Image: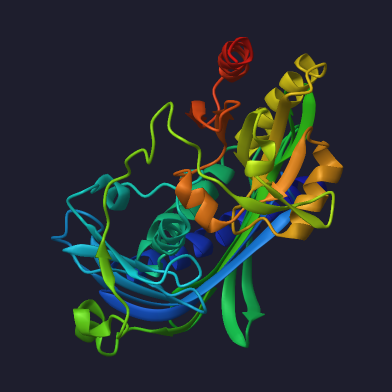
Amino acid sequence: MRNIFLILAIFSGIFLQAQEAREILGKSISTVSNLNEVSYHIDIRQTNMLSVDTTSISADCSLKRMPGDTIAKMYYYFSAKNSGFNKYNGTAYYAYNPEYYSFVLRYSVMENPDKFRNIVLPEGVSPPEVTSLFFYTYALLNSGKELQTMLDEINSAMTVNQLKFEFIRDTVMDKIKCFGFRIIKPRKNFSYNKLILIDQESFLPIAVIKDFRGGSLSVNHEKISVGQYSGITYSKIRESVPKFDFLMSDKSLPKKVEVTDHIPFKEPFKIGDLAPSWLLPEMSADKLISSDSLSGNIVVLDFTSTWCIHCIEGAQVIKDLHQKYSGRQDMVFINVFSSSADTKDKVKKYIRQHEPEGITILGSAEVEKQYGIMGYPGFFLIDRHGRIAYFQRGYSPNLEKALAKQIDDCLDKK
């Protein structure tokens, strides 16, 4: 009998805990939905289990809800430390990142409205757009979606044994008293843990921390660990935006910096054109290697990165082709790492882990621009005369077959 009472007490406590959690989350959702403008600082940290690398990015954000806007439903200004800014004012989107270019890039919102309406973090888009999408995706005015998901998961946890939740009535983050909400999804092959912290005074979220680990994935017979840890924190929150109209105007653009209208991507060359030349550092030796020194050879360039799974699939294709043509003295395979996220140390770590075949070099933003690299991976076949014989942007299952055919055609020609 005592055990029965104990079980009933436990279930009663869980039910009351869930009810209290629902009420607080509901109040937080209502607070966010009634928030028309806000300024705050955001820090975003992500660790990719694929490469075990951590990306950190932060910005001062100013946002104003614009229900009539058909693109983003809000106007925004994101100012990232040492990385310029991104802003959207209903008529144009502006990106400025002095690390990559010396001008402000202006996009017409009519050029590609889905980029702003359906925000997705695509693989391999240009850095300024990634920055904007990060900040937009995790914008405080959008955080009601995350809160609603947590509420739905708590409701599910009451009926589904595979979900567990924890309500923390009192905790502290950065000296702010918070409510904590944790949902846990333990499974045989993966685990998911999410924690949301809500300010006890303002009822605004101040942190969303997720940890997803999914075991491993087989890519070309190689086991790759997958999963992601992410932490988003909001601080210095003010329910107003000083000088928002000024931020949205052209007056906020940096002086003496040219504003250039974005031109939709167009291939910078065609088959048969001379390949852009380059002079870049080789990873295995303390020296530079030039495209001119490869004249007379057939060259395969693989523009790749340490952090994308399709690049690893592409690297396996390069390995197989390297083996296939190992008897040829006039074939050269080159791995080009030129993503801003791929430091020398990260590339060295990648080489130790995946042992790519061929020559590995560190690229540059200028070379990427010449080859029209907007994403990874990208493959280019250069003939004996330095002309582009074939190129493919992105990985596909028929990549090896297509490249091999084009290589054979080049080998047959003198």
Q: Position of residue 239 (x, y in %)?
A: 33, 83
Query: Which quarter of the rendered picture does the C terminus lie within?
Result: top right
Q: How is the image coloured?
A: rainbow
Identify whether 180 is placed above or below 345: below
Within the image, what quadrant is residue 191 found in?
Answer: top right
Up/down of 414 relative to 140, above or below: above
Residue 273: percent from left, percent from top: 43, 32
Foreground: 290 or 13?
A: 290
Q: Residue at the spot x=48%, y=58% of the render?
A: 127
Of residue 261 and residue 382, the one placed in the foreground of this image is: 382
Please say if 290 is above or below 312.
below
For image coordinates 62% across by 36% down, the residue present is 302
Quadrant holding the N terminus: top right
- Residue 400 in sight here: yes
x, y percentage for residue 313? Answer: 66, 29
Left of 302 or right of it: where is 249?
A: left
The one nearer the camera, 266 or 314, is 266
Task: Specify the quadrant of the image occupied by residue 28.
Answer: bottom left
Q: Position of residue 209 (x, y in %)?
A: 61, 61
Residue 1 in view: no
In the displayed structure, does residue 69 sit left or right of residue 255? left
